Amino acid sequence: MEWGMKNRLSRLIQKDGRALFLPIDHGYFQGPVHKLEEPGKTVEPLLPYADGIMLTRGVLRSCIKPSISKPVILRVSGGTSIIGEDLSNEEITTSVKEAIKLNASAVSASIYVGSKYEHQTLMSLSKLVNECEEYGIPVMAVTAVGRELEKREARYLALSCRIAAELGARVVKTYYCRENFEKVVKGCPVPVVIAGGPKVESEFEVFSFVYDALQKGAIGVNLGRNIWQNNYPVAMIKAIRAIIHEDATPKEAQQVFEEEKK
Ligand code: 5RP
């Protein structure tokens, strides 16, 4: 692996082999989602505890101070909206030249396996990898499911993750599933991080699925709504950080959360 690629990956994936990425890219198809109406304000207190932030060029340029030292994962796919016909109809929105100008440490694009636009999104990922490899920029593939949240089961996720890795993604972001998640990770030859999906009922549930995903081989998270939609987002990210980088159990993470809430 080239020095530049290694350097970018090591800024994102920490020395312990783990990573806590904080995504705030949801507006690229959902608009001003709850608690992300002003992304800059939402993310500022959370940044010290994240290993990287994932966002679009528009939010990066307008809402994030250029003096930050956190690595940026630039979302470069899109072109759909939550009220449009088909969320899978994504293409590449942002050039690699732009990613370099914005000093991105990685870029990220969604694939929609099994959808109407499967081929288009897989070819977009492949072309993106071709170009990014020229410049030593890692691509994080996002195995997206659009509105079909029920697709989040092991067989489907394993298929999507493996395809993303085969096409050259250096990291794959997928969803957690309770059953057979270890098979998803085992079948994917590159590091896997999990998203959280819509906010769940309790903090303990988040701590439990993050912990379980790590036990089953994930290297960390790319977790958004379950952090910044919580009423105590800083307590939440600190507790999740304890699971990822200090091997805290869900119970210990809950203690961190309760302490930090005060
Ligand atoms: C959707 C994304 C998000 O980055 C991803 O889903 C992680 O966020 P959350 O934990 O809120 O699901 O790719 O735009």
Image (tube, grey):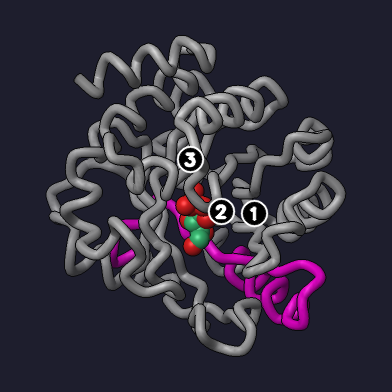
* SS for dot 2: strand
Q: Nearer the viewer, residue 196 or 103?
A: 196
* SS for dot 1: loop
Looking at the image, residue 15 sits to the left or right of residue 120; the answer is left
Which amino acid, mark 3?
Leu
> Quick one: label 1 or label 2, which is nearer the N terminus?
2
Which amino acid, mark 2?
Met
What label does residue 9 carry, if any? 3
The N terminus, quarter of image: top right
Circle 2 or circle 3, nearest the eye: 2
Q: Residues within 10 Å of mark 2 (few under 14, many from 20)?
A: many
Asked if disc 2 and disc 3 are in contact, CB closer than 8 Å, the reply is no
Which amino acid, mark 1?
Ala
Q: Residues within 10 Å of mark 3 (few under 14, many from 20)?
A: many
- Percent across and percent down for residue 229 are 35, 48
| Count of all numbered marks drawn on residues in the image | 3
Furthest-right residue in view? 155
What's the distance in space between the residues labelled 2 and 3, CA to CA?
10 Å
> Quick one: label 2 or label 3, which is nearer the N terminus?
3
Q: Nearer the viewer, residue 21 or 128?
A: 21
Q: Nearer the viewer, residue 241 or 227?
A: 227
What's the distance in space between the residues labelled 3 and 1, CA to CA?
12 Å
What's the distance in space between the residues labelled 1 and 2, CA to CA?
6 Å
Tell me what residue is drawn at x 29 percent, y 31 percent: 49
Q: Which residue range is magenta in the image?
A: 100-129
Looking at the image, residue 148 sits to the left or right of residue 220; the answer is right
